[in-house]
Image (cartoon, rainbow, N blue to C red):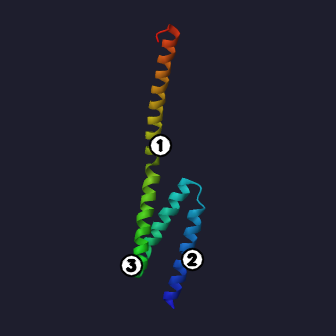
Amino acid sequence: MTDLASYIVIRRTYENFKNELSMCDNVKELKLKIQKFLSFLSSFDFEIETKLKEFASKQKEIAKKLLLIINIRYVIIFIYKYIINKLLSELINLINVVLRELNYGGF
């Protein structure tokens, strides 16, 4: 009976996490939900059968990758902005060169 009860609890918990993760619209909230999910997976890791353990292992791997991406998103955004600003600046400088040449009849 305890196996059936454990199965029902695990199933309901998975359903709750699925709903919570799919409804997250805030990055901070998503990060907390993923951390909570990882904690859940770690809490019953030693009690599960082999097939479910493989899925749990893959879920942990993906959840950890998600957390990594969430944590480095600011670095990615900074690099993106830096590249965009640099290219935009170069483009504007080249446009200025063409305008100067057109003003002085250099072409």
Is residue 84 or residue 76 the one in the foreground? 84
> Which mark identifies residue 77?
1
Please tell me how crowded label 3 is: few (under 14), some (14-19), or many (20+) other residues with Cα within 10 Å. few
Up the image or down, 105 lies above or below 86; here it is above
Q: CA distance from mark 2 to mark 3?
A: 19 Å
Q: Amino acid at mark 1?
A: Ile
Query: With 9 as the anchor, is 75 left or right in this view?
Result: left
Q: Amino acid at mark 2?
A: Arg
Q: At 45% from the left edge and 63% from the top edge, which residue is drawn? A: 63
Position of residue 41 measured from the top left corner of the image (x, y, whole percent)? 45, 71
At a point 47% along the width and 43% down the height, the residue shown is: 77
Q: Quadrant of residue 26?
A: bottom right
Mark 1 burial class by Cα count in 10 Å: few <14, some 14-19, many 20+: few
Query: Which residue does the numbered mark 3 point to in the structure image?
Result: 46
Q: Earlier in the sequence, mark 2 or mark 3?
A: 2
Q: Position of residue 42 (x, y in %)?
A: 42, 71
Q: Are marks 2 and 3 in contact (CB under 8 Å)?
A: no
In this orientation, which residue lies closer to the viewer: 3 or 90?
90
Extreme front residue here?
107
Q: CA distance from mark 2 to mark 1?
A: 37 Å
Q: Secondary structure at mark 1?
A: helix
Q: Return the residue at label 2.
A: 12
Dot in front, 2 or 1:
1
Q: Where in the figure is residue 6, as x and y percent of width and height?
A: 50, 83
What crowding class fits label 2: few (fewer than 14 Cα within 10 Å), some (14-19), or many (20 or more)?
few
Q: Amino acid at mark 3?
A: Phe
Give whichever of discs 2 and 1 has the lower sequence position: 2
